[in-house]
Amino acid sequence: MTDDDLLNMLRSLASAQKPPEFRLYYDETGKVLYYTCEKLEGNYIIVDSQVYNEGRYDVRVIDGKIVNTSEFIYTQKLVPSVMSGYNCAKENVNIIVSDDYEGETITWDVKQYEHKNS
């Protein structure tokens, strides 16, 4: 095999490789979960190499597009809950108690609200 044959073979191998597909995976609320080139289960959008390299987690995916979170205002509120949340002393919800607490308890959860900043 000559040097030219080797060079041609290397060129053909390099041209046969596909460029990587950069993916941004997100949850049902649009929150970024991770960036990867792997093909995994879940919601994702294909992004360019610049977005991938920045790897920003302070953005959201809405209608398949990246949106800066500075366009939104986020608030949180404690609400009574039956299904999940934090067990608190009934006489004072500021006190989170363990499962073996002997007094009366009430369960509270954190509800998150998202408002568009106009």
Image (cartoon, rainbow, N blue to C red):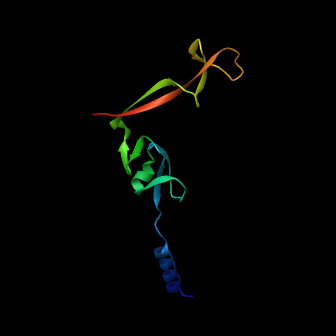
What residue is rendered at 45% in x and 31% in y?
Answer: 112
114 or 5, nearer to the observer = 114
Expressed as whole percent of the image width and height from the top left, the position of residue 108 reads: 55, 24
Farthest left residue? Answer: 118
Q: Look at the picture and state if 78 lies above or below 20.
A: above
Q: Quadrant of the C terminus?
A: top left
Q: Quadrant of the N terminus?
A: bottom right
Expressed as whole percent of the image width and height from the top left, the position of residue 49 reads: 42, 56
Q: Look at the picture and state if 101 lies above or below 11.
A: above
Q: Look at the picture and state if 66 lies above or below 114.
A: below
What residue is rendered at 72% in x and 21% in y?
Answer: 100
Expressed as whole percent of the image width and height from the top left, the position of residue 65 reads: 36, 50
Expressed as whole percent of the image width and height from the top left, the position of residue 34 reads: 51, 48
What residue is rendered at 48% in x and 75% in y?
Answer: 16
What residue is rendered at 67% in x and 14% in y?
Answer: 103
Farthest front residue? Answer: 82
Q: Quadrant of residue 30?
A: top left
Q: In the image, is 88 to the left or to the right of 4? A: right
13 or 97, nearer to the observer = 97
Q: Quadrant of residue 89?
A: top right
Labels in figure, total: 0
Farthest bottom residue? Answer: 1
